[in-house]
Image: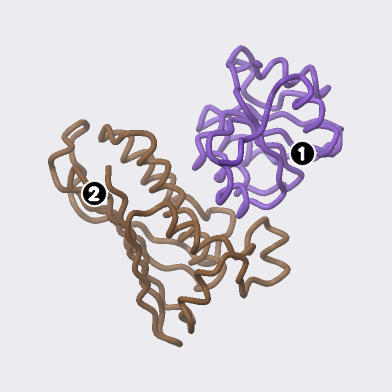
Amino acid sequence: MTIGEVRTLLDARVLCGEEMLEQTVLSACGSDMMSDVLAFVKEQSVLLTGLVNPQVIRTAEMMDMRCVVFVRGKMPDEAMLALARSHDMAVLTTPLRMYTACGRLYEAGLKGEDLS
Amino acid sequence: MTGAPAPEGRRSEALKERYIVDGDDFQAAGSASSAMKKLLRSLGVPPEAIRRAAICMYEGEINMVIHANGGEAEVAFDGETITMTLADSGPGIPDPELALREGWSTATDAIRDLGFGAGMGLPNMKRNSDEMTIDSTAGQGTTITMTVRV
């Protein structure tokens, strides 16, 4: 699935990283706890979250993620977007709630991580 | 920062960098980890090793900011091993064994509201490093040393 398809499925708005919409992402995770993202996520390239602070972008950076989606209509500030841009990360915002947003992506084939 | 930066691509040359972690600025937390990541990438270190080191360093950096009012981080790379030393003058960890249990945390609700403090930091640092030692004295501070082999 491409980041552009993520945008369409989530009725999302692209806040930065327009040039990355053709990039492919293979899996996703959703969490408001960055501690858990750092501890449990391995290869996900999309992070869905309702938390808004710069550490969301930092966490995604450390995990080599390509795309952050803010759910529930949350809006990052310009400093967060600048940080995302500096790490070639696409940032989207969707009015959908977390459960629905994750459900739409999962249903369309973007899976989470297998427990092993 | 101390030590002369190594020329790009020369992995055999020992390298040491020092970063100050500002304890008053949660917004800026992670900047040392970000700088380390960039440095390791410029040295040609494999992405998986960089990711493991970045997670270790970032968890440590966040801990220093939320628990210890900041500190210093030193990163050394000898071509085979990344060694990260994080030192603070905070309250110390009274029982490191307990602190290594997943879910155990002294973080406040305010810290949890920021997305951290789930009691996963130290266990995650241990999991992502090849070796980790905690040297802590109550009331004096903590030094955590972690290595990641490339």
Q: Left or right: A78 with respect to B21? A: right
Picture coordinates of residue A53, whole percent (x, y): 67, 49
Q: Which chain is purple?
A: A
Pointer 2 and pointer 1 on the same chain: no
To which residue does mark 2 refer? B81
Picture coordinates of residue A15, whole percent (x, y): 70, 27
Q: Neighbour class for label 2 at 10 Å: few (<14), some, many (≥20)? A: some
Residue ranking furthest to the bottom = B139
To which residue does mark 1 refer? A75
Picture coordinates of residue A98, whole percent (x, y): 81, 39
Q: How far is disc 2 from disc 1 in space, using C-alphas? A: 40 Å
Helix, strand or loop at disc 1? loop
Q: Nearer the viewer, residue A43 or A115?
A: A115
Residue A16, located in which quarter of the rendered image? top right
User: Pointers 2 and 1 in contact (CB under 8 A)?
Assistant: no
Q: Left or right: B12 with respect to B35? A: left
